[in-house]
Amino acid sequence: MSLIVRTGPQEYECRVGVLDSLNERLNKHDIHKIVIVHGTTSWEIAQPYLSELLGSNVEIELSTFNGECTYEEVERIADLASQINADAIIGVGGGKLMDTVKYSAAKSSKVNSILIPTLASNCAPWTPLSVMYTADGVCLGHDIHSKQVGILLIEPKLVLDSPVNYFIAGVADTIAKWYESDVILSQPAHQNNAFLLMARAAALNCKNNIVQYGEQAVADIKGQSLTSAFIQVVETIIAVSGLVGGLGDGYARTTIGHAVHDKITVFPETHAYLHGEKVAYGVMIQLAYEGKWREIDQLTDFYEELKLPKSLADLKLSYLTNEQLETFAGEIVKDATLKESGYPVSQGEMTNAIVELEEYIKGKSSK
């Protein structure tokens, strides 16, 4: 597998009041016509931060996001940008909206992407790829783009006003970067590549920052307190986490944890859970597969504090039959991202890991 480094956005800034500079940035980049793709509740919260832009001479076309990053939605927004000859597409919202806007903008060399996340739930605003879904929310995999995000602006006060469960999902998705990427990056064959070493350092930074500041940051968002710990975790979730894959490419993005997420979406019950929550369960499966029960013990208290799923029972999937579990395990091991794991991955062993984890967590809960 080749290593292609796609570091991150061309411009990135995170600070209170950063959106006050948006008009100046548009002028600097000769952007005069834009499409703004937005959510619903998030748009109501974000509008006061964009009052100067909305009252300017910039030609603006507003479009409400349909809720899923589908190929149809990508084409719809790309077509809309083409119809008005837009210079840029601005995305205001969460991860799936960010992924859609990136993809739509990437379809034209003339269209820039400007991302304004209202959540810190994953690294979607940073990465040059999009996770694709069906209209019903079933994950189809991810597509990598030929160009990176143009401008990424994070207003911490805007993120502070987001739902707590999305932030917790971001914390979970970020700590997973270490457990998933280190399976590959720790291999001796990768110790002499400068970019893979930097990717591993970024992944370790993700883990350390979340362990050190994560619970405090969650308390801060619950109490609506803008602190340095909160901003540190926001940047870790979006930027540092995004750098792991940006520097390490396919060697540093995902392994079993995200493969579990992608395949578990076939069960409708899981659609009520956020990306990071399903990845959190996937990390538990990965550690069980690797026989790292001590690390599962170390994570359990952290998971329980943040109410993250540790088992199928936590995801309301305890009804799955042995046959369904085997099918689920078989789909996980088909994931192309597992080829670099450094150990053999089989359907039988994956089924065993799922079952053993369930029994282990149940046993811990009964004590």
Image: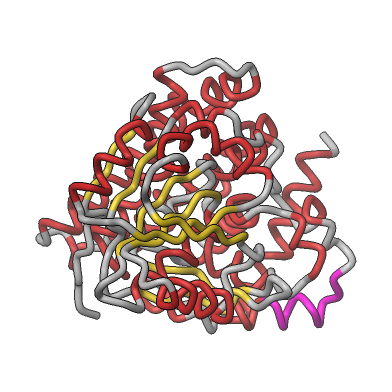
134 is higher (above) or lower (below) than 9? below
Judging depth in this view, the residue of 353 and 133 nearest the camera is: 133
Judging depth in this view, the residue of 217 and 284 nearest the camera is: 217
User: Is residue 342 in sight in this rendering?
Assistant: no
User: Is residue 167 in sight in this rendering?
Assistant: yes
Residue 206 image offset from top left, x and y in percent: 37, 40
Prevalent SS, magenta region:
helix
Residue 98 image offset from top left, x and y in percent: 47, 58
The mark tally for this picture is 0
At 54% from the left and 69% from the top, the residue drawn is 259
User: What is the image's colouring?
Assistant: secondary structure
Residue 156 picture quarter: top left
181 is higher (above) or lower (below) than 117? below
Q: Quadrant of the N terminus?
A: bottom left
Judging depth in this view, the residue of 64 and 103 nearest the camera is: 64
At 49% from the left and 18% from the top, the residue drawn is 226
Using residue 170 as the reference point, say whether residue 353 is left or right of it. right
Extent of the magenta region: 320-328
